[in-house]
Amino acid sequence: MKTGFPENFLWGGAMASSQAEGGWDQGGKGLDTQDLRYFDPAWTREERAKKENRRMSDAKFRAALTTDDTVHYPFRHGIDFYHRWREDLDLFQELGIKVLRTSLCWARIYPNGDDPTPNEEGLRFYCDLFDECHRRGIKVFATMLHYNIPVNLVQKYGGWKSRKTVECYLRYTRTLFERLGDRVDYWLPFNEFNAGKFNPYNGVCLVEDQESDYQNAIFQCLHNQFIANALTVKQGHEILPGSKIGGMIARFTTYPATCKPDDVMQMILDDQYSNWFYLDVMARGHYPAYMDRYFAQQGIHIQMEPGDADILRENTIAFVSFSYYFSQVSTTDQGWEKTSGNLIMANKNPYLETSEWGWQKDPVGLRVTLNQVYDRYQLPVFIAENGLGAKDVVEEDGSIHDPYRIDYLKAHVEQMKEAVKDGVDLIGYTMWGFIDLVSCGSMEMSKRYGVIYVDQDDAGHGTLARSRKDSFYWYQRCIRSNGETLD
Ligand code: BGP
């Protein structure tokens, strides 16, 4: 029996280009889809949560194309990591992380997505960043796409609806393997594959009111992404034999709301449609049979090309990863109380407490998830995201006391350890937003995940100075002791 984390366990931190970098119009970068998301710092909490305020519309899309504003387009400034990354790495090194998970910005490397040659300045940025990580003993876990694609691909090809976008993506990933290959330790072609279904603008870059058959378009895009994913795996193995390329979903762990058999069946269906479908295609190499029934019921017709089934079968992922923030329950009771969750509205579990944003905190659910995922695929597992979004208060002396975050992280690390004892081959943990970032869902700064504080408010005002929260020292001790010292 294993008694603790493996010796080479990859403790780390995760972030994404659009939420951190800024420099939206610098270094030859093209406009990308996250640069167009509109936010009003004056919105109340309720307005921030409203679906229509989060959703991209044709009108919002067009308006964003004509403005240089950054206050209402927070992904354009992020936390200015583009200019501050060297000093940030000093803090990452002091924290002791073994791996940095970040995404590359496609539009920084191919500004229009379909350019014949890459933007050398964009490539240089990532070369320098990854070289410096390695010089400091930090491995690199690179997400090739974390939502933001060049806007031109949406305008010209309808985003992921077209195989032309797959072709452009493969040109981009080829460049990454060829030019950055020796600087990357783990690859992830797509962030949270199921986001395409639950947040189609982020995941598959569809603008809802530009589509005549939205649901069908979503699944067509997802199919194209599955093909892109498999061909990236193929490409990676040809260019860099032995490269480690994984697949990721946002894990919506779910329990039956009651032991009523209908609720149990509902849980199985929710799990298949929301979670397993995506990992099954990437890890098992084919569309699962349960989706035939779903597609028939929903009237979904996916256009596949000859050879697609072979592509999926021959190019499966080497490790499984997921983000995990909360759990929910499944029920046939339409009136069941709801609460928020990452990408979805969730059914409430009376046994769990929620975060300030309504996400249900469930550390044991992480152990459940790890066991489920490992049982199903028998592949190494990497927790690519986990953390607590909360409001922080800066004291007069500059200190930030965040026991709520420490409690959350501690409880999750304890359950990870239990899962390791259960026999799960857990290889890494990259805490989400370990440096405060612009929130992906609500686009605000006040929802903070970091153990490193960034002095910036929702309107983008502040010195951008970085400082250590109490949780910084907690995570530092956790990493130094390889998960043994959690107090
Ligand atoms: C995941 C995304 C991240 C991140 C996280 C937290 O879905 O991959 O980009 O932001 O959720 O979500 P939020 O920022 O909305 O709190």
Image (cartoon, rainbow, N blue to C red):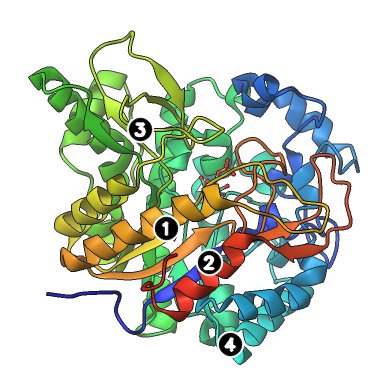
Residue 134: which numbered mark, if any? 4
* Residue type for callout 3: Leu
Q: Secondary structure at mark 3?
A: loop
* Residue type for callout 2: Trp
Position in image of residue 180 (x %, y %): 58, 81
Q: Which residue is mark 1?
A: 410
Residue at 74% across / 32% down in the picture? Answer: 61
Residue 450: which numbered mark, if any? none
Relative horizontal placement of residue 70, taking residue 138 as reference (left or right):
right
First in sequence, mark 4 or 1: give its number: 4
* Residues at circles 4 and 3 in contact by the CB criterion of under 8 Å: no
Q: Above or below — where is 50 with respect to 228?
A: above
First in sequence, mark 3 or 2: give its number: 3
Residue at 33% across / 13% down in the picture? Answer: 336
Relative horizontal placement of residue 228, taking residue 302 as reference (left or right):
right
Q: Secondary structure at mark 2?
A: helix
For the residues labelled 1 and 3, the Cα–Cα distance comes to 17 Å
Q: Above or below — where is 173 with respect to 338?
A: below
First in sequence, mark 1 or 2: give its number: 1
Q: Which residue is mark 3?
A: 352
Residue at 47% across / 80% down in the picture? Answer: 480
